[in-house]
Image (cartoon, rainbow, N blue to C red):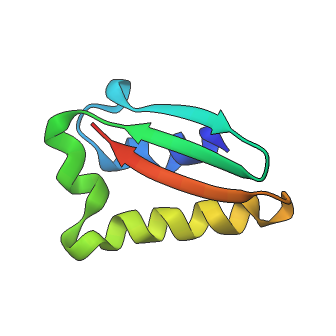
Amino acid sequence: MKELIETIVKPLVDFPEDVHVNEHEEDQRVTYKLSVNKSDMGKVIGKQGRVAKAIRTVVYAAGSSQHKKIFLEIVE
């Protein structure tokens, strides 16, 4: 899943080397924290959050085979 998130996000940003995904797993949920360069934050979120919503939709669909709730947080 980490590779999927990186594959989606890296082409969108100016500093792909600053894209990092951390995974935090609990009993019934997995949280992925996506961090990007400060100047790329707007590109990842998009106008009115549309890009972020699209990324989340793809990640949630890909993770639906797992029996855990998946969350994607975008952090600095």
Q: Is residue 50 left or right of residue 20?
A: left
Image quadrant where residue 70 sits: bottom right
Q: Is residue 43 depicted above or below 54 in this figure?
A: above
Q: Quadrant of the N terminus?
A: top right
Q: How many marks?
A: 0
Rendered residue at 85%/60% (across/down): 67
- Quadrant of residue 61 in the image? bottom right
Q: Is residue 60 left or right of residue 43?
A: right
Identify which residue, 76 or 17, lies in the foreground.
76
Name the residue: 31% across, 36% down. 36
Tell me where residue 30 appears, x and y as whole percent.
67, 47
Closest to the observer, 49 or 11: 49
State the residue lying farthest toward the left. 39
Residue drawn at x 30%, y 54% as measured from the top left? 44
Tell me the quadrant of the picture where the C terminus can be found: top left
Q: Is residue 34 left or right of residue 59?
A: left
Q: Residue 72: x, y in percent?
A: 51, 53
User: Residue 19: horizontal and vertical position, in percent?
Assistant: 39, 32
Q: Residue at x 54, y 47 (%)?
A: 5
Q: Which residue occupies the extreme front position in the image?
A: 27
Pick the residue in front: 34 or 13.
34
- Image coordinates of residue 20 in percent, x first then y, are 44, 30
